[in-house]
Amino acid sequence: MDWLTLANEVVNGKELNEEEALSILNSDDDELLNLLQGAFTIRKHYYGKKVKLNMIINTKSGLCPENCGYCSQSSISTAPIEKYRMMDRESILAGAERAYNLKVGTYCIVASGRGPSEKELDTVVSAVKDIKEHYGLKVCACLGLLKPNQASRLKEAGVDRYNHNINTSKEHHESITTSHTYNNRVETIEAVKSSGISPCSGVIIGMRETKKDVVNMAYSLKVLDADSIPVNFLHAIDGTPLEGTDDLDPRYCLKVLALFRFINPTKEIRISGGREVNLRSLQPLGLYAANSIFVGDYLTTKGQESTSDHEMLKDLGFEVEFDFEENEALTV
């Protein structure tokens, strides 16, 4: 396959068919640099050499009634994680100050659970209003399944983006969780879109899915019109049903990132959880397809030092995109 020619066709409006999509995942490793050149051609056309930085704060840990097989916070997990109820407003604001100082453009407020209680929503709404006033950060919320009126409240408070991942394909969903449906997740994404909040939805790769499942995920997110697509790579945690799963290698992960860029050329593709343990020394190459990363730690697993991420971007010759208002941080 001539990946550069295909990339230029995508820039000019071509949509990949399933055979072409699968050929990316099935490509020989000795084609990898040519494939990444094609992905970078698309990425550069829409985003240049800019990289968006995102940071997570885990505002509520564990105590989740769902049975997601990948998650250390689920009801069926025996992983020894820290568990705590919803943080207070002051703690969420302290995290926002750290994000501001690290030049992070999007601050992600994440809470475990099926969906937010009204009290938890009140806390997030109050915190978001103050974050907007003091720091001007873009705010992404990730609070689980959401009702339309809850989405409207978050929009009014100033939430820019809402994350709710499809995680896997519709066909593979019941192999990962049965406490909610794939359609439940889609309904939340649609509620977010209807409220005027930018939809963020992504996947977890490496959960014993097939390559066709991966292709279906990329197409599903295209249909859902997710503005931001986080691509997570499974970091299997002891004490979860997926404990010991290790189906990924760095070269396949790069092919997955290229696939998502070819199928969703105009969207923010974010290298997310598990990049350190799955991409390993090939992490920098991922940014030739993706244009966004998380810095700092994840929900219950450690990331790499933010200074290492900034050094990586500098070494690549890429530019951090500051997409928040340049107002001075105030003392809270």
Image (cartoon, helix red, strand yellow):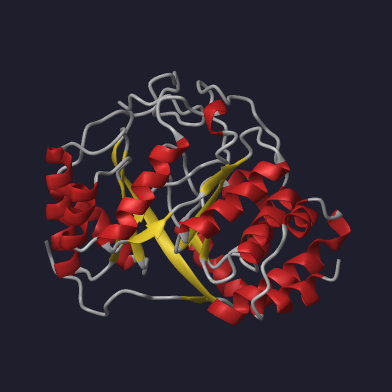
Instruction: Tell me, yes or no, if residue 271 can be seen here.
Output: no
Report which quarter residue 254 is drawn in.
Answer: bottom right
| Front position in the image: 249 or 95 | 249
Instruction: Tell me, yes or no, if residue 273 can be seen here.
Output: yes
Residue 13's place in the image compared with 73, above or below, is below
> Is the N terminus in the top left, top right, bottom left or bottom right quadrant?
bottom right
Give the total of numbered labels.
0
Identified at 61% across, 66% down, the residue is 287
Residue 133's place in the image compared with 278, above or below, is below
> Is the C terminus in the top left, top right, bottom left or bottom right quadrant?
bottom left
| Residue 266 placement, left or right of 322 | right
| Residue 71 placement, left or right of 192 | right
Identified at 79% across, 77% down, the residue is 5
Position of residue 61 measured from the top left corner of the image (x, y, whole percent): 31, 34
| Residue 44 placement, left or right of 251 | left
Identified at 58% across, 26% down, the residue is 242
Identified at 77% across, 57% down, the residue is 24
Position of residue 309 measured from the top left corner of the image (x, y, whole percent): 52, 62
